[in-house]
Image (tube, grey):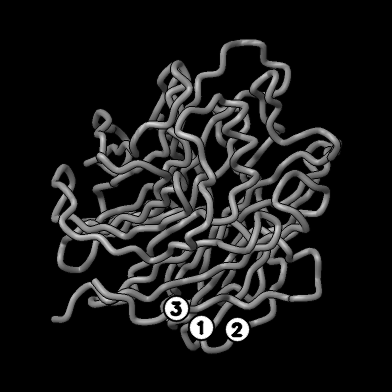
Amino acid sequence: MKILSRGTIPKPVDDIRFNSITFPCIEILPSGRWLVTFKASQIKGDCAQVQSMMMWTDDEGETWSEPYQPVRLPDIDGVPGQCRISYPLSLGSKNVLLLCNWVDVSDTSKPYYDEKNETLKDTRIFYSFSKDQGLSWSEPYLMDTDPIIDPVPLTGQPFLLYDGTVVCHFEINKSIGDTSKWIHKSAMIFSKDGGLTWGDVAKVTEVPNMYYWDQRPNVMNDGNTIVNYFWTLDGLHNRYLNIHSKISRDGGKTWSGFRDTQIYGQPGRPVELYDGRIATVDINRTKSPVITVRTCKGYDIPYDESLVVYDNNSVGQDSCKVSMQEAWQEMYRFSVGHPALLRLNDREMLAYYYTGENCDHTSIEYVRIQYSED
């Protein structure tokens, strides 16, 4: 692997609403358009002004549209909400699906995560459709996640199986007022009609005292195998472990046991390359934030190649030993994160992430990587 080029997605420099740019997602449409979404806010932590924005480029980053808000999410039963993050998925031709997270903002003085009670503000999923490559969007529809009624923060971009099934993935957190012990869960929900209706929730993780956070799944080339990676916190001993992974051979219905990847850090979205290798991306913030792309010849096979795509040689930003409360506080201070991979063609892929001088002043950077010379 070798780096071919680097780029930064431009943002308004004199608009404080765009100080903090996080949670980037890039989707390539059939026309070649790169459709980009991200979370924009004045500061990275909890604040009243947060919005999910969208941009696009038709020349692979040479020029960019101005950022715009694709959808405005409605109140739910009179409760106002913010659209914090959104993730696009191409449905073919000019059609695009957008998944959005709605978060209760009826009282912005309260934190998103309540450290004392380990609860999350009400978080729901909406979805919307575009027929013109993301320029305009339908009214948003509230997803029915029955039987899940707890907060459901999205964990990344949806993807398509070989039969056209859309896979949406999320975490299940504890609702305000719930006094039971929190058992963190990761899950998926499916749509067999292009995102119009959803159902058949499948649990991916549910282990007491273990937090398999930020699941980062993607479908492999066969259209049915899903490989999934987890940022792993041992809640009993208050320490981060290596990244763990799981695999599903039936489109997400059932899952293998956990596998220790032997790599420490936080994972990003993987891809399977055209030659059959699996490419992964991870960030290790122990000494300084370092983002590494790795390849292996298959699941359960050790990595055989790695490439550092980012290293700012600053100070460390995470603690190996950390309580749940400390972990949440630490996350707000991250100035580099949310890496992901995107396959461009049969020779190249894109790694992208947010980074900046401090947690409240960040942008999206991307790295074009050649993985094959054939």
Of label 3 and label 1, which has the lower sequence position?
A: 3
What is the CA distance from the residue labelled 3 to the residue labelled 2?
Answer: 15 Å
Amino acid bearing label 3: Arg
Q: Residues within 10 Å of mark 2 (few under 14, many from 20)?
A: some
Amino acid bearing label 2: Trp
The disc placed on residue 64 is 2
What is the CA distance from the residue labelled 3 to the residue labelled 1?
Answer: 10 Å
Q: Residue at x 47, y 28 (%)?
A: 321
Give x and y (percent) for residue 130. 59, 69
The disc placed on residue 185 is none
Q: Nearer the viewer, residue 360 or 321?
A: 321
Q: Residues within 10 Å of mark 1 (few under 14, many from 20)?
A: some
The disc placed on residue 61 is 1
Element assignment for label 3: strand
Give x and y (percent) for residue 289. 47, 54
Q: Residue at x 23, y 65 (%)?
A: 273
Give x and y (percent) for residue 165. 37, 51
What is the CA distance from the residue labelled 1 to the residue labelled 2?
Answer: 7 Å
Give x and y (percent) for residue 292. 35, 58
| Above or below 134: residue 5 | below
Rendering quarter of residue 305: bottom left
Q: Nearer the viewer, mark 3 or mark 1?
A: 3
Labels 1 & 2 near each other (Cβ < 8 A): yes
For disc 3, the marked residue is 6
Q: Residues within 10 Å of mark 3 (few under 14, many from 20)?
A: some
